[in-house]
Amino acid sequence: MLTPTEVREAVERAQRRFVEACASATDEQWRFQPPGSGDRAWTMPQVVEHVTTGNQGVLLMMQSVVVSSPRGDQMPDFDDEDMPYLFYGGGGAPPPGLPEPSGAWAQDHGIAAFEESMRALLGWYDAVDVDLRGCAVAHPAFGLFDGAQWMLFQAVHAQQHRGQLLDLKRAADEATTAAV
């Protein structure tokens, strides 16, 4: 089980790596629209908007539901060390009620909005006066997480979509090279 400091460090590391993937994108990479449909066809702004909106939603859920949901004798469905592997195999359907991202965010705005959403999560995490290991709420696709695992989930979610950002950058570069 990770310590509170290790949980925080995992979120900070995911934030830093996600921002690096966004900030190093060229205008062409940022605007690139891959062929296909569904989440694999999202643009970089759509990915950033999705992760940012997810962070905001999880923060609200943690503030209002997780802290008032005692875990009791229920055990989380995953160990902390297993959290990075949640998305292997696709990760299931998106949470209900999460809107399709617009894709209209400019690069600077997207990075700033994402960073603010992560700062808000970490600020709340640092200030919360509840033992998050003693709280638990089920994720709609993955099962029961304790409160600290919800923070780890946000790190894993950002890392999963960072991979998508890197794939988009490569695809944009390949499309540009093929067009020449």
Image (cartoon, rainbow, N blue to C red):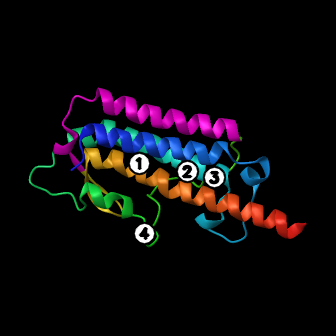
User: Which one is earlier in the sequence, the residue at label 3 or at label 4?
Assistant: 3
Locate the C terminus by quadrant.
bottom right
Q: Are marks 3 and 2 in contact (CB under 8 Å)?
A: yes
Q: Amino acid at mark 4?
A: Tyr
Q: Amino acid at mark 2?
A: His
Q: Are marks 4 and 1 in contact (CB under 8 Å)?
A: no
- In the image, the segment drawn in magenta is 107-136
| Residue 69 visible in the snapshot | no
Circle number at residue 88: 4
Kind of element beneath mark 1? helix
Q: Are marks 3 and 1 in contact (CB under 8 Å)?
A: no
As for residue 121 lying within the magenta part, the answer is yes
Question: Disc 3 versus disc 4: distance between alpha carbons?
Answer: 21 Å
State the image quarter where residue 132 is shown: top left
- Residue 77 spot, x, y in % from top left: 23, 62
Q: Which-is-in-front pick, marks 2 and 1?
A: 1
Q: Check disc 1 and report the residue beneath it.
A: 154
Q: Check disc 3 and report the residue beneath it.
A: 46
Q: Check disc 2 and report the residue beneath it.
A: 50
Question: Disc 4 versus disc 2: distance between alpha carbons?
Answer: 19 Å
Kind of element beneath mark 4? loop
User: Which one is earlier in the sequence, the residue at label 4 or at label 1?
Assistant: 4
